[in-house]
Image (cartoon, rainbow, N blue to C red):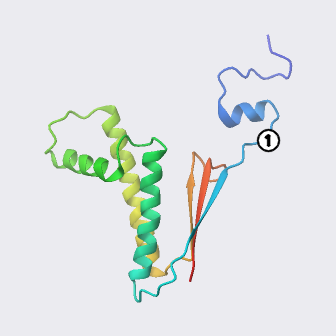
Amino acid sequence: QMPEGGLVERGLSGERTRRARGEMPRRATHTHLEVPLRRDLGGGEGAQLRASLIEGLVKYLLFVRGQIPRQYDEVHTEHARAGDGRSPAKSTMASRRRGKCVDAAETAFASVRALSQAQAPDMAAVVVGHSPTLPKEVYVLRFAV
């Protein structure tokens, strides 16, 4: 028998449950980080520094939000050893997931570096969550010029 309202909510999760109950979607937590880079480093050094700050924030968030068990550089080194065949440990589901995470992060970091070399960004947004349209958290970095 269907409950009052016509939808069986058991088994639904997150956003679908809210929509089923007629509630508004959850708003993202916005964190604005002002990064005062007031030095003219000349050439591509300023762009490289901005790209490194973005990359560092993403690495920090991956660890702090529990997406990886150790700091990113340790997980990256472990993944590189496993790829070279130098790691004695067997491949487990968790290590394969961490490997996918590292591969996706490295692809994103390469994109950030390439975009920064083309033009030094004045602002960057790091969106955390399942969907960019309904993120869980948004970190906005504004670089002073």
Image quadrant where residue 48 sits? bottom left
Residue 121: x and y in percent read 53, 76
Q: Quadrant of the C terminus?
A: bottom right
Dot 1 corresponds to which residue? 24
Please indicate whether residue 2 sits to the left or right of residue 109 in the image. Answer: right
Residue shown at the point (23%, 51%) measured from the top left: 80
Q: Is residue 101 above or below residue 8?
A: below
* Amino acid of disc 1: Met
Q: Is residue 2 above or below residue 116?
A: above
Residue 111: x and y in percent read 43, 67
Q: Give the number of marks.
A: 1
Residue shown at the point (45%, 76%) measured from the top left: 116
Residue 110: x and y in percent read 38, 66
Q: Quadrant of the N terminus?
A: top right
Residue shown at the point (40%, 55%) measured from the top left: 105
Task: Report the front residue among 54 and 144.
Answer: 144
Residue 50: x and y in percent read 46, 73
Task: Report the front residue among 35 and 106.
Answer: 35
Circle 1 crowding by C-alpha within 10 Å: few under 14, some 14–19, many from 20: few
Task: Report the front residue among 76 and 5.
Answer: 76
Identify the element where label 1 is drawn. Answer: loop
